[in-house]
Structure formats: structure tokens, C-alpha cells
């Protein structure tokens, strides 16, 4: 009976230790700003409207400026208004 108990505990401990390792794994998370090569071909030749705020930047440069430099046809920029 004790052997079964210890086997159960042993199995339980090792199964949760593997589970904990998978929970602690954090893959590299890339934002859209870091992956312009993935969506830039989809924007080429199209009229593009942007919804941005003051934090919309790619490597410290405002998003509209970056896209214009890359040849994207930005035709409208929408931004929220602040009523203080």
C-alpha cells in the first residue's frame, strides 16, 4: 500500500514539474512594427488609411513617416481627439 502511495506521489510530482516548465517557456513575441516585411507587400499599390495615436512608432519614427519612406500610399490619417 505504501509503495502505491509513493509511486502516486512520484508520478504526480514529475508530471507537474514538466507542466511547470512548459508554463515558464515564453516565446519571442514580435509586434507588427518588428515585422514590416510580413505586411508591406500587402500594402504596396493600395491607398492606405491609418488609425494612429502619438505612440504609433516603428523604431522611434512615427508610423506614417515610416510607411511613406517605404513607398506606401498613405491617403488618410485618423487620430483620436482629446477633450480635456
Image (cartoon, rainbow, N blue to C red):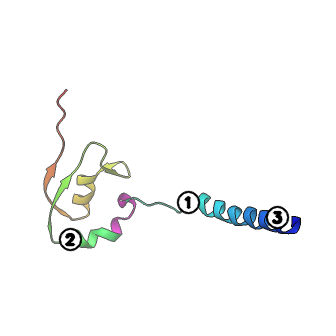
Q: Is residue 57 above or below residue 43?
A: above
Q: Provide the secondary structure element on which disc 1 rests.
A: loop
**Gap in angstroms between the C-alphas marked 1 and 3:** 34 Å
In the image, taking residue 12 as reference, residue 26 lies left or right, namely left
Q: Is residue 33 magenta?
A: yes
Whichever of callouts 2 and 3 sits on the residue coming sooner in the sequence is 3
Q: Is residue 78 above or below residue 38?
A: above
Whichever of callouts 1 and 3 sits on the residue coming sooner in the sequence is 3
Q: Magenta span: helix, strand or loop, mainly?
A: helix
Q: Is residue 55 above or below residue 75?
A: above
Q: In which quarter of the image is residue 37?
A: bottom left
Residues in magenta, as a range: 32-37
Are the residues tagged 1 and 3 within 8 Å (C-beta)?
A: no
Measuring from the top left, give residue 56's x and y in whole percent.
30, 49
Whichever of callouts 1 and 2 sits on the residue coming sooner in the sequence is 1
Q: Is residue 10 magenta?
A: no
For disc 2, the marked residue is: 44
Which residue does the image show at 73% across and 64% down from the upper left? 12
Q: Residue 5 carries which label?
A: 3
Q: In which quarter of the image is residue 68?
A: bottom left
Disc number lying in front (1 or 3): 3
Q: Residue 34 carries which label?
A: none
Q: Provide the secondary structure element on which disc 3 rests.
A: helix
How many numbered marks have been drawn onto this rendered protein structure? 3
Measuring from the top left, give residue 46's x and y in whole percent.
15, 69
Disc number lying in front (2 or 3): 3
Disc number lying in front (1 or 2): 1
Amino acid at each position: 500500500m505504501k509503495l502505491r502511495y509513493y509511486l502516486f506521489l512520484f508520478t504526480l510530482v514529475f508530471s507537474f514539474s514538466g507542466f511547470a516548465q512548459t508554463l515558464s517557456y515564453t516565446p519571442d513575441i514580435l509586434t507588427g512594427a518588428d515585422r514590416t516585411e510580413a505586411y508591406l507587400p500587402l500594402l504596396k499599390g493600395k491607398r492606405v488609411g491609418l488609425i494612429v495615436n502619438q505612440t504609433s512608432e516603428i523604431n522611434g519614427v512615427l508610423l506614417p513617416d515610416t510607411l511613406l519612406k517605404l513607398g506606401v500610399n498613405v491617403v488618410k490619417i485618423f487620430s483620436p481627439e482629446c477633450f480635456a
